[in-house]
Amino acid sequence: MLARTRRIRADFTLTASALALAVAFAVPGAHAQEESAYEIETVAEGFDNAWGMAFVPEDGRLLVSERPGRLKLVDRDSGEVEEISGLPDIHAQGQGGLLDIALYPDFADENWLYMAWSGINDDGQSSTYIGRARLDIDALELSDLEELFVAEPFDDAGQGHYGSRIAFDSDNRVYFSVGDRQSKDFGPQHYAQDLTGDLGKIHRLEADGSVPEDNPFVDVEEARDTIWSYGHRNPQGLAFHPETGELWQNEHGENNGDEINVIQGGGNFGWPIATWGVDYRTGERFAPTPPEVADTVDPVYWWESDHPEGFPPSGLTFYDGDAFEGWQGNMFMGNLAHQYLGHFSVNGMEVEMEERLLDGEGWRIRDVAVGPDNGYLYVLIDDSNAPLVRLVPASD
């Protein structure tokens, strides 16, 4: 292990004046908090715009994707980092590149690595790709690459909002997010509201790329049969609750309006016809807000458009380890702009902000995951030459 351990005591206790300010801005979950003690350990160093990670079962190592188009294998004990070959052709521009990765749940029997990346067509337009390849850990290479899904329409207006988070359910079906590609064509005709296209959606496939027969829009004429939910802007976090089996998601709003959602199959989550966000161009709130729009699903937690600090979210996870007893069932979510790891308590559909971990480190937190063997919390940082760190209980 690399020798860098620091003791941190994260304190998000609100003063009376701060609590009054929070109430004035109607921030869901604002309340006085207790502090958590932890230490930061550096696992390995030198990552460039790390994006996603996956633990290799019974191996003790960790896979890390880098957005410029590299896949690394990390020994969590020694800090040794090796590169894996055989990646697909990747269009690494803007927010695009090699994005999320996930190992097939039965990886020991079927050694598939699932990947999300941005690619381009013959016209130079880009889109979100989902695929899988066989991973040979000993040879450090991928083979038998299969493209399972390519989001349409392709877009050449920008290089952002690819979405690209991946999650598996208990039946080994694969769910993944596709962003709205920064479309400003607001209204009912927007990509995210258009069921004939793939953008601004969460999709569901069988592990082999076929479409499950019970997907909600299979029998809807002209609708894409892979769609699981729609009305999303740029979903950056996707995870199943380990106890309830519910699919939780976060996404970026426009000019705040960031959301945490519990995804319902067939649900319309509102973007852009129902949102708490504000139009970047005009400074005016999008109208109306979600509760006022019939047949849309409200977020379970959001950041108000007039609050001075939104929460540009990224990877999320639920804590189910043993190292931090008081964190059981809690949710952790990266913050990109304000550079901390959000700690949230979850009680059914009620979500409360507990504290800001890693606050003051100056790190854009891209992804977070619970280590399978020790319950430590592993954190990826979106920067050049950045470390991979983990949070461990503070020593006495």
Image: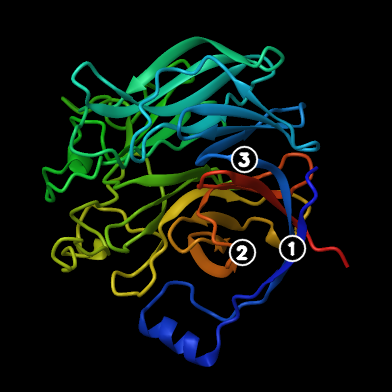
- State if disc 3 and disc 1 touch (CB < 8 Å): no
Q: Where the C terminus falls, by quadrant?
A: bottom right
Secondary structure under tag 3 reads strand
Label 2 is placed on what type of residue?
Leu
Label 1 or label 3, whichever comes before in sequence order: 1
Label 3 is placed on what type of residue?
Gly
Question: Is there any visible trace of residue 310 in the rendered image?
Answer: yes
Residue 89 disc label: none
Label 3 sits on residue? 46
Depicted 330 relative to depicted 81: above or below: below
Residue at image location 29% in from the left, 50% down from the top: 269
Give the quadrant of residue 147.
top left
Label 1 is placed on what type of residue?
Tyr
Label 2 sits on residue? 357
Residue at image location 55% in from the left, 88% down from the top: 15
Label 1 or label 2, whichever comes before in sequence order: 1
Distance, label 1 to label 2, CA atoms, is 9 Å
Rendering coords of residue 56 (x, y %): 69, 28
Residue at image location 35% in from the left, 75% down from the top: 308
Q: How crowded is the residue under tag 2: few (<14 C-alpha within 10 Å), some, or many (20+)?
A: many
Residue at image location 29% in from the left, 69% down from the top: 305
Give the quadrant of residue 74.
top right
Query: Horizontally, is 246 left or right of 75 in the view?
Result: left
Distance, label 1 to label 3, CA atoms, is 23 Å
Which color mode does the image show? Answer: rainbow
Residue 38 disc label: 1
